[in-house]
Amino acid sequence: MAAPVKVMQIIARMNVGGPAVIVAELMRGLDKSAFEQILVTGYCDENEADYLDTVATDLKATRIAGLGRSVSLVADLKAFFGLVSLIRKYKPDVIHTHTAKAGVLGRLASLLAGRGAVRVHTFHGHLLHGYFSNTVTKLVILIEKILAARTSVLIAIGSKVRDDLVAAGIGRADKYRVFFPGLPAPKVITKAAAQSALGISTETLYITFVGRLTQIKRPDRLLDVTLECKVRGLDLRFLVAGEGELFESSKARCLQEQLNVTFFGWRNDIDQIFTASDIAILTSDNEGIPLTLIQAAQAGLPIVATNVGSISDIVINESTGYLTQTTAPAMADAIEKLVRDAQLRKIMGEAGKARAAQYFSLDPMIKDHADLYRSL
């Protein structure tokens, strides 16, 4: 019998969000008789919830200080040499890095460790827009170009993400695979039961935002949309699940402007919140392929989202929801159509649910990765 393929999954931090969910499902889902995995990660920031502590409590990880989000020369060097040591000790066949910082440190550590492991890197999004100044962005692109040349396979979690990276000269097109993220089917619960559990009214329309309250997600735009809907006299309430550095300022603005928003903070019952809702919304400047919108589609919700990143792989404009310009009036226009037409909400929600079942279920994602690791 062949020995298991040894896979080291390296991710900067397992904060609540898409990359952590995907990595956790890979750790759980790959056949343990065929694959021996180790999860290596850093620590979350103070204003972030750690997915390993809050949801994936069944998973074990090797923590390396300094591998997290913050950039610090001393801490980063410690993390780098910690990775080199771990690679030499574990001797993986495949080193699979996730997120930008872990992608840089992990692949460089693999080169220095000299163990001949195959390098795979997943772009769960990219840093080409909305994160840094032009100068820093050019440096990021240069580093990624160099590393792409020393990486066997580059995975993009959406077609637009891949196209953007190839256009920037990061890796050849034939080095890329597009693997859509897969999620388990949500727990079945009635809308009435979900609303009762959350203590919200059955008489109100709810539009829900799930995500980190951080600049790239544009919670300020979400509140602009809320205000626009209020001015238009639309009878609905916004639900927000998530925290981040803009959490307190967002709550303060809602209080000051008397906006119809309920803040839930970090939650591990997102399926229930979407089941209790009528519409999902995302207001980001940049995205990979947001798993929260896949969850919304699984719950049968029509989606209103900015047309950025690979959101268009999830939301088919005017079929499963609306892809809009990044302005509050444009988003409010889409919301107004859905608020005023219950049948349209139902048709779009059902179409989105069918698409999620076809393209974003868990088994194909696990199989894609298993086949890739074996082939390498």
Image: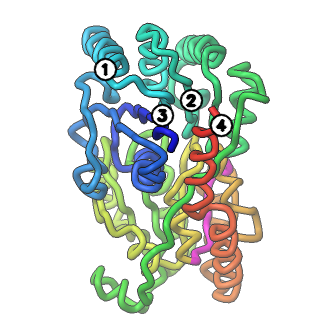
Q: Label 4 belongs to which residue?
A: 375
CA separation, marks 1 and 2?
19 Å
Q: Is residue 214 above or below residue 340?
A: above
The residue range painted magenta reads 300-308
Q: Secondary structure at mark 4?
A: helix
Q: Label 1 belongs to which residue?
A: 89
Q: Residue at x 69, y 58 (%)?
A: 323
Q: Label 3 belongs to which residue?
A: 98
Give the class, few, some or many, for how many residues have Cα within 10 Å of label 4's Cα (few <14, many ≥20): few
Q: Secondary structure at mark 2?
A: strand
Residues tagged 4 and 3 counted as in contact (Cβ below 8 A): no
Give the class, few, some or many, for how many residues have Cα within 10 Å of label 2's Cα (few <14, many ≥20): many
Q: Is residue 67 above or below residue 115?
A: below
Q: Residue at x 59, y 49 (%)?
A: 289
Q: Amino acid at mark 1?
A: Lys
Q: Amino acid at mark 3?
A: His
Give the class, few, some or many, for how many residues have Cα within 10 Å of label 1's Cα (few <14, many ≥20): few
Q: Amino acid at mark 4?
A: Ser
Quarter of the image where one finds residue 109: top left
Identify the mark nearer the N-term, 4 or 1.
1
CA separation, marks 1 and 3?
21 Å
Comparing marks 4 and 2, which lies closer to the viewer?
4
Identify the mark nearer the N-term, 4 or 2.
2
Task: Tell whether position 20 is magenta.
Answer: no
CA separation, marks 2 and 3?
9 Å
